[in-house]
Image: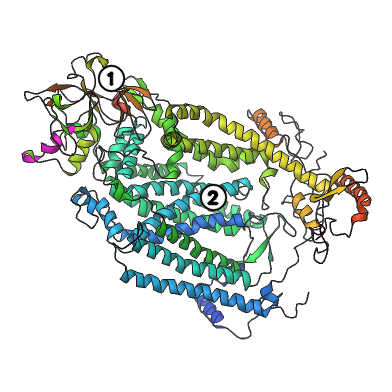
Amino acid sequence: MDTSKVANSNTTTAATAKKPSRAAAAATWADERLGLAGMAKKNLRKVFPDHWSFMLGEIALWSFVVLLLTGVFLTLWFTPSMGEVQYNGTYEQLRGIHMSEAFASTLRISFDVRGGLLMRQMHHWAAMLFVASMMVHLLRVFFTGAYRKPRELNWVIGSLLLLLGTLEGFTGYSLPDDLLSGTGIRAADGFIKASPVVGSYMSFFLFGGEFPGESIIPRLYTIHVLLIPGLLLALIAAHMLLLVYHKHTQWPGPGRTEKNVVGYPMLPVYAAKAGGFFFIVFGVTAFLGGLLSINPVWKYGPYDPSKVTAGSQPDWYMGWPDGALRIMPGIETHLWGYTISWNVMLPILVLPIAAFAFVMMLPFIDAWITGDKREHHLLERPRNAPTRTALMVALMTMYGLFWIAGGNDIIAIKLHSSINAITYFLRGAVFIGPVIAFIITRRWCISLQRKDNDTLLHGYETGIIMRSAEGGYSERHLPLPGTRAYTLTARERDPALNGGPNGHGTDANGVPAPGTGRLAGFQHRVRTLWWADNVQKPTVAELEEGHHHAEHEHELQESTDGHAADGHQFDGHHLVEDETLRGH
Amino acid sequence: MSTPPIDQAHDAGHDEPVDENLPARDDLFANPGLEEHHWRPTDVDPKAEKRAERQVAALFALSALCTIGLLVAYVTIDSDDTVGDLGAQNLAFGLLLAGALLGIGIGIIQWARKLMADVEMVEYRHSAASSEEDRAATVQALADGLEESGIGRRPLVRNSLLGAVGLLGLPAIVFLRDLGPTNAQVVKNPPFIGSGLEHTVWKKGMRVVRDVVGTPIKASDLQIGDLVNAEPEALFNGGEDGEPLEGVALQVAKSKGAVVVVRMQPDEITPGKGRENWTVDGIICYSKICTHVGCPISLYERTTHHLLCPCHQSTFDLADSARVVFGPAARPLPQLALEVDSEGYLTAQADFDEPVGPSYWERG
């Protein structure tokens, strides 16, 4: 290629300043006072690998920034008080109605502060985006195995961020003190009261006396604007620092190994892309806030403990425990004058805490099962860890079914079906569905592994149908280009499990057999399940045999080589231009 | 299929030295190395480069225009202007702000993709752990520090310190005590009428009145199949000098006192034990507060006498002491004993005989 005309943006050597530039002067001034050059020299050109899925966490980060900006705006007018006032603002339908100052100031922000409604709606949309992108980011990290050593602690921090983000969302949408959010707080009071022994005490302390009291809104406000955002900021900082320290994971590929990281430097490309992306996330929330109404509290009216709207539902991320609460059978135990509300406690207090604890423990559970204590920086394709992938799909299925249960009334209305039938079905489905999803996903992954091996051994399908002299038809296969074959096989073999469950030495791969503890047998069984039936990449011998076979086929098809439809127009061996294809 | 040892380095095609601490892959194919860099049109064609430059600048200019438009919209659009069903103000602010932000965002990314260097760089990783020497030195420093502090040798000092610091956790919890009174305190020293989980504002002779308007209900005015959302009369005259309740007192009273009154054929009712005279001519009254987690219940199906909670779909049979027929609630709705006063209006015989609303530990 003629590179003499290459623009000056791409050079093979680092740019050297001819004379001290203004940037250099500023850097010198700062370094003489802060001494950051030592650290900055490594990090200014830090390399970040590129892949679309690495952007998901970034959406969460930037939506958090949007939340901070719009949130500060809202605090300038919001009055976190349950003091009763008579509304006399511009929204006619509610004029003369008694309501809390919190609700009245929310109406003021929505109708009388220019841009106030936009900021409220952007704040709510950004909150949705924040929680949703954290969830999808979590799935990406899990499905690709990025949570493995040394990143287990960052996984734990990320899980805490999701938990705190969810609580932050709940405290936030409760603040306007409208009928819907008040109903949510009413239910939350019921959840708290269901705690054994201390329930009524916790409820009375939280509400400053009997529900609803006049303290809950100011207290939620402090939690929402100070306590949780502070924790979120600290944890996000720790999450980012660890990301920088560990260096980002990358997909295997040509030149990409466990020992390096390949990508663009922080300055300028990655900084520009990430900085530009902040404006895009910000812009998208502005677009959503301008165009799509969200949480129109004026339609719900102020909170009234004797009123409720049909189809009361929390924000979507609170939907799954609410669904569990809906389909739980009404079991309550009365013992020696005390009440244990299993029907509330199990689905809403025990289940979410247990689920979060399980998610947080996943990296450690994985390490315990596999006995893998090595560092991992190359990502794995979901198909190449079938049991892990199936485990998360099973969890997602359970989440989805609980979430559907959270909308069982809406579904019954829309589908004209019996809410009782839907509920009974879901009671079973939340247990059976994940098992089915697990089995299907696992087998599906294993099939995809087989397909990869087929492609490696017998080449890829060209779409060219050959007709033999005898009149038989066959599809032409061609060997994969070198880089693709390399990428496809750049994965580890699963260890074979010859070691017995009783700790007799090591297995064929040198992996120590599980210890002799009480759990050893269980560990061995789980470990066997973890890798059982996985398809390993071909061996050198198998590959050679496959190639030999392919060469033979090539000889048979030699007569077509070089012609328009030999299949090589698809892999870049020659262009299809200026050739007649299919008679045109 | 044979499975070679996973710890054995088989480092085909790698130039770097093998680090025993890192996993090795048995590469079937030699690592082809980084893919060749392809020049972009903007690298080799000055025209394309200029075009990209103009695109980026145009996006920034678009952003600036949107910002100016946003400022103009701020001062020109009235809050009651509309575009179709949408408020013009919010729509204009949102779209113009989005344009201003997206112009900058897309512009910067276009700049990065088309004009900034796009040569991939390689950086080497290091193990997350520190070097052996560093770690040994740190462990040594830690050991020295601990040794010099004598924390291991002086258990009396150590344990008394741990005890003292641990004890400080108590005030951190105890000082939250005044967040609110307990249920027992509220019962003993009621801030409002009907305070405490076991009580409501209902009492003997209190009229059952329609919610919102507060008019009393004449038993003879109710038709069979009617459901009335009702409240205790105290909400409308329980304050000082017969004024309506206000603020917290009103909210607490409402959150426990709200009831539903329904009329059905008297022979359809299966009265609960000891509740034979709690109804008036087929008029029966229950707490409106769900026994599950406390939502007010509102959806009544008159043919089946079923009342459904819109929050979690607990369903109660009002003809049969509000027994739970479906859903997650465990207890029937508390029933309010009714009678009529001398003028024929519905009144309560007494307060509820059990706590209304969600269950709690001491409820029994």
Q: Amino acid at mark 2?
A: Glu
Percent coordinates x, y for residue B327 in the rendering: 39, 27
Between A354 and A419, the one lying in front of the other is A419
The outermost residue toward the front is A584
Residue ID for mark 1: B321
Q: Alpha-carbon neighbours of circle 1 within 10 Å: few (<14), some, or many (≥20)?
A: many
The reply to whether the magenta stretch includes residue B233 is yes
Dot 1 falls on a residue whose secondary structure is loop
Q: Position of residue B222 (x, y in %)?
A: 18, 26
Secondary structure type for disc 2:
helix
Give, as a single range, the part of the protein colored magenta.
B231-241
* Marks 2 & 1 on one chain: yes
Q: Which residue is mark 2?
A: B147
Q: Nearer the viewer, mark 2 or mark 1?
A: 1
- Residue at 31% in and 21% down: A337
Percent across and percent down for residue A428 are 52, 27
Q: Earlier in the sequence, mark 2 or mark 1?
A: 2
Quarter of the figure with residue A272: bottom right
